[in-house]
Image (spheres, rainbow, N blue to C red):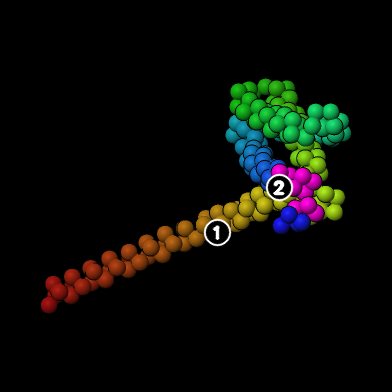
Amino acid sequence: MATHSARVWTHGRAAAAGYWLAWLATLTFFGGFYALLVPLTRYLGSEGVGLPDWQVGFVLGMFGVAALIARPLSGVAVDRFGARALMLVGAASLAFGALLVPLTADFGALAGLRVLQSIGYVAFTTGGTALVVSLTKSTVRPAANVATAGMAAPVLSTVEDITSVGLVFLAILVPVLVLVAVLVLVWAAVRIVRRRRRKAAA
């Protein structure tokens, strides 16, 4: 076991614990990130503050533009401040960028909060990648899937897909079961009425 740890981790069991902690942190982070997507779109549109379509697209599109600019800067920041610090800043930025959205209906403020969310995403994922690189040896980094601190994001995506399929299946199955139950009740009621009529006739 010790030999295997020495081949995989840069600092033995401590590095292994750090890796799985990063994995769990990434799972939690992407859970929050994905949970934000649909409510944010609905809040910006006619179901929320009622921004015009072009403004909704602009606010959402600011995420990609900000990420493009912030990505190289995050590499400089991780060298200067460290991977863990950048992950903390990223998580805080995404959280504040999400929590402050319901407090405003201003187009400019919403665009700024979307930029803050993007900075949080970039900072966290860059910090997570750098952390896993520092914890694993070069021979096993491809297997560690350093881009997402392990398999956390793919696992979450898979769980989301399974949940979505399950909800669709339930959405179809439940009405069918209700209809079957109603038909059974009607059939049972008709049989009871017929029996009573036969008894009354006899």
Q: Position of residue 141 (x, y in %)?
A: 82, 51
Q: Give the Cα separation between the discs numbered 2 and 1.
A: 43 Å
Which class describes the residues within 10 Å of circle 2: few (<14), some (14-19), or many (20+)? Answer: some
Q: Which mark is residue 190?
A: none
The residue indicated by pointer 1 is: 169
| Helix, strand or loop under label 1 | helix
Quarter of the figure that contains the N terminus: bottom right
Q: Which mark is residue 13?
A: 2
Q: Which residues are magenta?
A: 5-16
Nearer to us in this view, 21 or 86:
21
Q: Position of residue 145 (x, y in %)?
A: 78, 51
Q: Is residue 94 left or right of residue 61?
A: left
Mark with earlier residue (2, 1): 2
Quarter of the figure that contains the C terminus: bottom left
Which class describes the residues within 10 Å of circle 1: few (<14), some (14-19), or many (20+)? Answer: few
Q: Position of residue 196 (x, y in %)?
A: 18, 70
Furthest toward the bottom, the residue is 202
Q: Residue at x 56, y 57 (%)?
A: 166
Furthest toward the front, the residue is 2
- Is 173 above or below relative to 77? below
* Residue type indicated by callout 1: Phe
